[in-house]
Each structure stands twice: as structure tokens, then as C-alpha cells.
Image (cartoon, grey):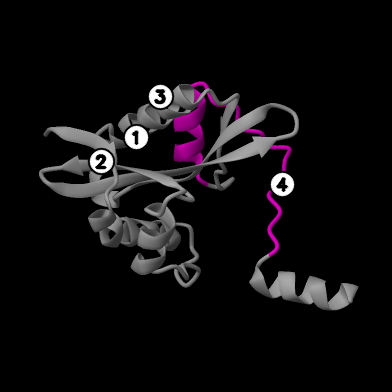
Amino acid sequence: MKISIRKAEKADMANVLNLIKELAIFEKEPDAVEISVADLERDGFKEHPEFQCFVAEAENKIEGIALVYKRYSTWKGSVLHLEDLVVSQKMRGNQIGTLLLDEVVKYGNQLGVKRICWDVLDWNEDAIAFYEKKGANVMRDWDVVHLNEQGIKGYLSNIN
């Protein structure tokens, strides 16, 4: 089976959203996805896109995605954040994840970033093993902190 990796196009966003939703189900958060195809099209394809997305195609069907964006580290400087690397469940084990991660690392190198970072759930041992095999440092002593939309509003209501 031939697998090709390319930059996503606006017309791919419905398939990208389907894979994002598949990931949310896998991560036991099936109702967490709030974005729409229109959001992805707007945010990823404007003059200064908020993200870059790579897709993996097999037999003319998108079977994987890697969505990244730049950020800044006060310790390192320019950093690339891998928000999601998703391979459809039926296509796992076909090297799609490796090909997508390869593309992300090449892209980060082209940008001249000092680090590529991402999160992984502590119970996703297959992903952790995959990333460690690729040379990534899974920092188990750090916790991810989020302030969601409701939390932002609550926070703001307490400071005024």
C-alpha cells in the first residue's frame, strides 16, 4: 500500500475533523470537540494561519493527520507544538504515524525551531513507547494545566 504525506488543503478539513473526533473518542472525551470544519478552514488557511496540518493518504483516503503550530519558549526560543498526531484506528501499524512524525520533524527543522513538543496521555503506553523509540523524552514529572473557556470567565469574574 502506497502512503503519501502532504500539506493539508482547505478541502481536507472535513476529513481532518473526522480524525480529530476519532481521537477524542479514543481519549475518552467524545463530546470535547467543539470546533467545526468552518473553524478549521478559517484558522488554517488565512493570511497568517494558526496551524499547519499534514495529512497521510492511502488509496486516495486521508488516514492520518499531524497538526502543528509555532510557539515560544522562554528557555529555548522558537518551538513547534504538535497538537495532534492521529492515525485512523483501522490503519494503525502501517507506518503512517512514523511518516507523519518524520514530516513534522523535517518541518520543525526547516523552521529552525529549538524544540518540538507534544502531550501524550499517561495511559497510552503504545504511543509512549512509539515516541520513546523515536528518541523523544516523555517527561512524566510534568502535569498539563488547562484553563477552559468557563474557567477563563470565572477567573476574570474574580479579578474585577
Q: Amino acid at mark 1?
A: Leu
List the single residue furthest toward the front. Answer: 47
Q: Nearer the viewer, residue 85 or 25?
A: 85
Q: Which mark is residue 87?
A: none
Task: List x then y, in percent, for residue 113.
Answer: 56, 26
Mark 4 secondary-structure assignment: loop
Marks counted in the figure total 4
Q: Nearer the viewer, residue 73 or 95?
A: 73
Label 3: few (<14), some (14–19) or many (≥20) C-alpha neighbours in 10 Å: few
**Residue at image location 40% in from the left, 61% down from the top:** 42
- Mark 3 or mark 2, which has the lower sequence index? 2
Residues at discs 1 and 4 in contact (Cβ within 8 Å): no
Mark 1 secondary-structure assignment: helix
- Mark 1 or mark 2, which has the lower sequence index? 2
Report how far apart the C-alphas of labels 1 and 2 lie in the structure: 7 Å
Q: Where 88 sits versus 94, above or below?
A: below
Quadrant position of the N terminus in the picture: top left
